Image (cartoon, grey):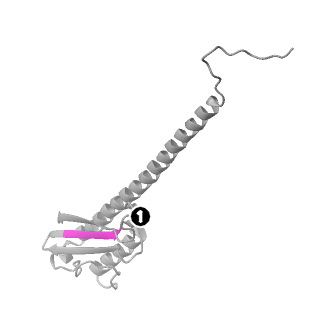
Amino acid sequence: MSLQRSVAPGRTRQHGAGLLEVLIAVLIMGIGMLGVAAMQATALRNSQGALERSQAVVQSYSILDAMRANRDAVVTGSYNTAGLACVAPAAGSLAQTDVRLWITSLKATLGDGAATCGGVNCNGTDCSITVQWDDSRSSDGAAAGSATSQIITRARL
């Protein structure tokens, strides 16, 4: 006596349909996980850029505070740099020491690269503080190594 199952006419048996469904589900979940990883990388890159911009603003306000404490030197132009200073100047007067400490602090917080520079330009009590740094880590990678950012803060002392 043989045991055979009878199949209704017109119906065929399906084999492996469950396995195929599982494989498709795993594929879809894998693509979704790759998307989550890409979003995480973008979030990290954007937060790095935001941190650097915040530090640049804090640094520009730090030199402004030093300048407010030495207003007479600001009026005479002692804090002015010739363009962007990428190397800390020699210490000398209080204004030169303030600029030296500021450039050193810029290099410490925004990176010691050649693009990390600061500039002070005052016309009387109207001052413009420029902070520039290498922002290539927070860019999308299209121009890796060449992205510089700049923040200019204007204030009246």
The quarter of the image holding the C terminus is: bottom left
Label 1 neighbour load within 10 Å: few <14, some 14-19, many 20+: some
Residue farthest along the right direction in this orientation: 1
**Residue at figure coordinates x 36%, y 56% from the top left:** 50
Residue farthest along the front direction in this orientation: 9
Q: Nearer the viewer, residue 48 or 79?
A: 48
- Residue 106, quarter of the rendered image: bottom left
Q: Nearer the viewer, residue 28 or 111?
A: 28
The magenta-colored residue range is 128-135
Q: Nearer the viewer, residue 150 or 62?
A: 150
The quarter of the image holding the N terminus is: top right
Q: State the image coordinates of residue 4 (x, y, percent, origin top left).
A: 78, 17
Q: State the image coordinates of residue 143 (x, y, percent, origin top left).
A: 36, 67
Question: Is the stretch drawn in magenta largely helix, strand or loop?
Answer: strand
The secondary element bearing badge 1 is classed as: helix
- Residue 125, quarter of the rendered image: bottom left
Q: Is residue 1 left or right of residue 48?
A: right
The residue pinned by badge 1 equals 137
Asked if residue 18 is positioned above or below residue 126 in the image, the reply reads above
Q: State the image coordinates of residue 82 (x, y, percent, origin top left).
A: 22, 82
Q: Is residue 40 magenta?
A: no
Q: Nearer the viewer, residue 114 or 137?
A: 137
Q: State the image coordinates of residue 142 (x, y, percent, origin top left).
A: 37, 64
**Residue at figure coordinates x 40%, y 75% from the top left:** 113
Counting every numbered tag in the picture gives: 1
Asked if residue 47 is positioned above or below residue 130 in the image, the reply reads above
Q: Is residue 33 left or right of residue 128?
A: right
Q: Amino acid at mark 1?
A: Arg
Asked if residue 114 is positioned above or below residue 60 in the image, the reply reads below
Q: Is residue 130 magenta?
A: yes
**Residue at figure coordinates x 32%, y 64% from the top left:** 56
